[in-house]
Amino acid sequence: MPFPRAPPSATRGPSPGLGVPRRSPARGKHAGGGAPGSGAAVNWQRGGRSGAERRLRRRTGRATFRGERVRQRGFPPRSADMELENIVANTVLLKAREGGGGNRKGKSKKWKQMLQFPHISLCEELRQTIEKDYSSLCERQPIGRLLFRQFCETRPELRRCVKFLDAVADFEVTPDEKRKECGQELMDRYFNPKSEDHVSEVEEAMAARCAERLQHDACKELFKDPTRLIHDFLSVAPFADYLDSMFYNRFLQWKWLERQPVTKRTFRQYRVLGKGGFGEVCACQVRATGKMYACKKLEKKRIKKRKGEAMALNEKQILEKVNSRFVVSLAYAYETKDALCLVLTLMNGGDLKFHIYHMGEAGFDETRAVFYAAEICCGLEDLHRERIVYRDLKPENILLDDQGHIRISDLGLAVHVPEGEAIKGRVGTVGYMAPEVVQNERYTFSPDWWALGCLLYEMIEGQSPFQQRKKKIKREEVERLVKEVEEEYSSKFSEDARSLCKMLLAKDPTERLGCQGGGASEVKAHPIFHSINFKRLEAGMLEAPFIPDPQAIYCKDVLDIEQFSTVKGVELEPKDESFYSKVSTGSVSIPWQNEMIDTECFLELNVFHQDGVVPPDLDWRGQPSPPPKQGLLQRLFGRQECCGNCSDSEEEPTRL
């Protein structure tokens, strides 16, 4: 059965002889950040025009509408020039999403110059200051993990350890019905003294215990103890040797690149996607790698006027701290003259609110709803592991990526819960706030499990459990329903779906599923999830039940996204710089390293001599090559080019 496609009303890229529909119905909330109905990017009337846009206009013979558009209730009739503006914006964005159509996949012509390794002598300060922690350098950081494994490949005894760890990782994501067979093969290969891959570091007694447990229960955690033992072994002498190797020196070179300044020249800017709380959200692309992101702009004057410094910094720090495939990632944070910019995961598939209410009959079939609930559960688990309560779970904050998987977005209301403490705060969205929040009582993570119940109910029923769509109900009445009235269930709910919703929507948080000591594991153990292998889900190995149309742009047209009014009566002062410096901290380590790997920059640049000879740029005895001499005209007029800010000679697209 083919996957459902985007509806005719979704904005699509133009085809020969076809135009773009006048309005795209998706919300402006699909970009990895921002609150619905708020936000900002850059004014399309003021944006520069790329070569691609100018060429399209020359072919069509149409001029661009440049006048200010009067914003009134509803949407005034569009002129042909307005329609062309939207077509051009979508065309340029779709081309960028597809990699630009060339072999460089969106990379700049000068991408290798932008990512040129420094001579290792320039990394001495980094070597002295970086924390020598095995877990961080060799497990959590993606490039560090790959380079440590390359080092291990040079020694047979270490190569066996790495192969064993990889085999355990494969075992953990093996389907339940095949796991016992896979476990037996693993033991025969790595625990058998006669095998050439025998891992001698694992004692016979430990191997025997694993063999006995395998016969009774081939659980995913079967090889937990041997895995910990191997990591303990690798973290001592092998790790010390790695720190003296050219592989670690190459890691320092990557870290040097990672820590280079980030500015607006690091990116190409594309069309406005939506609105956040303090500014617009627009699409952007890293020049050096071609990676697409969403840029959430926080206007400095708007932040100051609303006294939103603490909220903005809190969201940035939480995004920076969380590393989850189910939560939008912060990849970069930088500043311009007028704004602080958070560069986040770009989610092209729209938000769940659009998919629930604008894709045919309201709601999803239960299989699809349960799949999304499982992924949201994993996202909440990752947040709660960092002791972060989300507090704003609702359909418009759940975004879909190109493959139909979800991520939690907009962490503006999220807050850290100190160990052993509870917090108070009557925050959230009406209809999704738990009874203890409405009553201003203390809580830890219970509001998130309540909101998951509300969301699951809405995905199946096609309306919220405590308020009807498009029907105005006073806030006080909604809160009374939340505190006192049991939700009603239609025939759309199976027994398992009804059971899970009722357990998540328990009025008393001490009786609520997820709040009785087990957290997310309690929710995952519910019978409705019996068909979901959570290890495979967390590894991104399960196919989503719906895949968004790659030629659809799930957001409002450029001209339908209302602009912010100018902030008046606010002046920026030197003392504000302290706050700006806390936000604009540059690249975020793990997302940046993943970007280098995903875009194949790591593969192309991370080259060593096959004979084991140390490359010149890794030779501590050598000196960095002096920069080429520049002529007088170059010194006077030439643009200094450095990593991340190197300008391209080709015409670069800008936002509309």
Image (tube, rainbow, N blue to C red):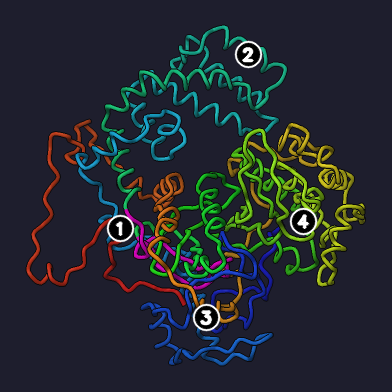
- Tell me residue 398's x, y (percent): 66, 57
In depth, the one of 649 and 275 nearer the eye is: 275
Q: Position of residue 183 (x, y in %)?
A: 61, 22
Decide: few, some or many residues near mark 3? Use Cα within 10 Å; few <14, some 14-19, many ≥20: many
* Residue 173 point in image, percent of width and height: 61, 34
Question: Would residue 590 appear left or right of 640 to someone viewing this image?
Answer: right
The answer for how far apart the CA atoms under marks 1 and 3 are is 29 Å
Give the amino acid type for the residue marked by disc 4 in the picture. Tyr
Of the numbered discs in the image, which one, if any, rests on residue 211?
2
**Residue 63 drawn above or below residue 24:** below
- Is residue 75 something that shows in the picture? yes
> For the residues marked 1 and 4, what is the alpha-carbon distance in whole angstroms?
46 Å
- Tag nearer the camera, 1 or 4: 4
The residue at which mark 3 appears reads as 87
Rendered residue at 52%/69% (across/down): 302
Q: Is residue 128 above or below residue 305?
A: above
Q: CA distance from mark 2 to mark 4?
A: 48 Å
From the viewer's perspective, is the residue at label 1 or at label 2 nearer? 1
Residue 103 visible from this viewpoint: no
Residue of label 4? 432
Which residue is more in the foreground, 147 or 188?
147
Q: Which residues, given as a range, are shown in magenta?
A: 261-287
Residue 271 versus residue 377 in the image, above or below: below
Q: Decide whether residue 461 is among the magenta residues.
A: no
In this rendering, which labeled residue sits more in front, label 2 or label 4? Answer: 4
Q: Is residue 419 above or below residue 300?
A: above
Mark 3 or 4, which is nearer the eye? 4
Q: Amino acid at mark 3?
A: Ile
